[in-house]
Image (cartoon, rainbow, N blue to C red):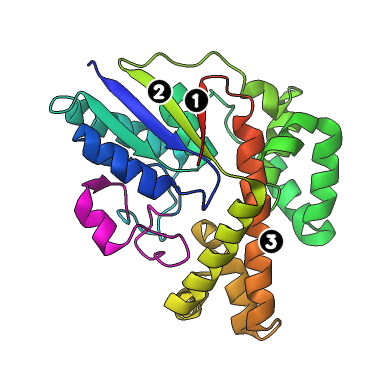
Amino acid sequence: MQGELIFVLGPTAVGKTAYAIELARELGSPIINCDSRQIFKEMRIGTAVPSKEELELVRHYFIQTHTIEKPYTAGEYELEALELIEELFRRHSHLVVCGGSCLYADALCNGLDAFPDADPQLRATLNSRLQSEGLEALRRELSLLDPDSFRTIDLSNPRRVVRALEVTIQTGKRYSQWKSNPKKSRPFSIRKIGLAREREILYDRINSRVEKMVADGLAEEARGLIGKRNLPALNTVGYKEMFQYLDGTISLERAKELISRNTRHYAKKQLSYWARDKEIEWIKL
């Protein structure tokens, strides 16, 4: 297999979709989605899935192709995406990948690290502590045991925090060190294009996106999913806050404020994660 995989990445709301579509049309390439939530068919508004018009401009893969009912991992994405890429390179010399999910991007570009199998007893203990002590207590412990993971993983995701602690405690080796194994070779070249904007412009775009999501019916979409709110896929910015609104614990305005704030936090995490990658060519929009 030969060809060039061009990865368009950057923080949420920076403008990856529009840039990737323009690039793909220039190259005659389809687009392979690398957003871990746009993959799910039940989540459209809250994940900012490309519009019908955008999807008609370029062939997209991994957009609303899986169900939230079945857990989907970065490892599964790696295998499915590589199989698709092998097939597409028979017809294309360049392929465009677009998305901001750091773990999925790492899985596709570098391969996942060989983490140890889970220890069910330890995981049960940590989950019990999560319920009794709260997420903040586990975050503090992670900050002491593995400061690098504390700085880079999504600390709002209990599953990520528990997993990082589990691996560190189980093996005596920091979770972040397990993620430093040599990357796997790929039978194609990879070019990474990172998109950036001034912070205030990015934050304005985030606020505008949240307003549009609400106007487009985010509350109604969340209402249809509230019975499945405990599924991992729905532990996501936009849906978590809307569930609180639908529960009556916060107002709609407060829900929008929280979505914007938590999206800003997520964008910072993305930028922090990618700052270590010297292969990325950054473009300021």
Q: Residue furthest bottom?
A: 248
Residue bearing mark 3: 261
Q: Nearer the viewer, residue 117 or 204?
A: 204
> Whole-percent x and y of residue 48?
43, 60
> Whole-percent x and y of residue 60?
26, 47
Residue 49 included in the magenta stretch of the image: yes
Name the N-terminal-most of marks 1 and 3: 3
Q: Work out how far the residue at label 3 is from the one at label 2, CA to CA, in angstroms.
A: 31 Å
Disc sitting over residue 125 in the figure? none
Residue bearing mark 1: 281
Q: Mark 1 or mark 3: which is in front?
A: 1
Query: Residue shown at 83%/32% (left/top)?
Result: 145
Query: Could you tell me which quadrant the N terminus lies in?
Result: top left
Q: Measured along the vertical axis of the image, is residue 132 above or below residue 272?
A: below
Q: Measured along the vertical axis of the image, is residue 280 above or below residue 248?
A: above
Asked which secondary structure carries label 1, the reply is strand
Query: Residue shown at 68%/68% (left/top)?
Result: 258
Residue bearing mark 2: 191
For the residue marked with disc 1, what is the amino acid? Glu
Asked if one can make out residue 45 in the rendered structure from this viewpoint, the answer is: yes
Asked which secondary structure carries label 3, the reply is helix
> Whole-percent x and y of residue 170?
72, 30
Which SS does the magenta portion mostly show? loop
For the residues labelled 1 and 2, say whether their Cβ atoms are less than 8 Å apart: yes
Magenta span of residues: 38-63
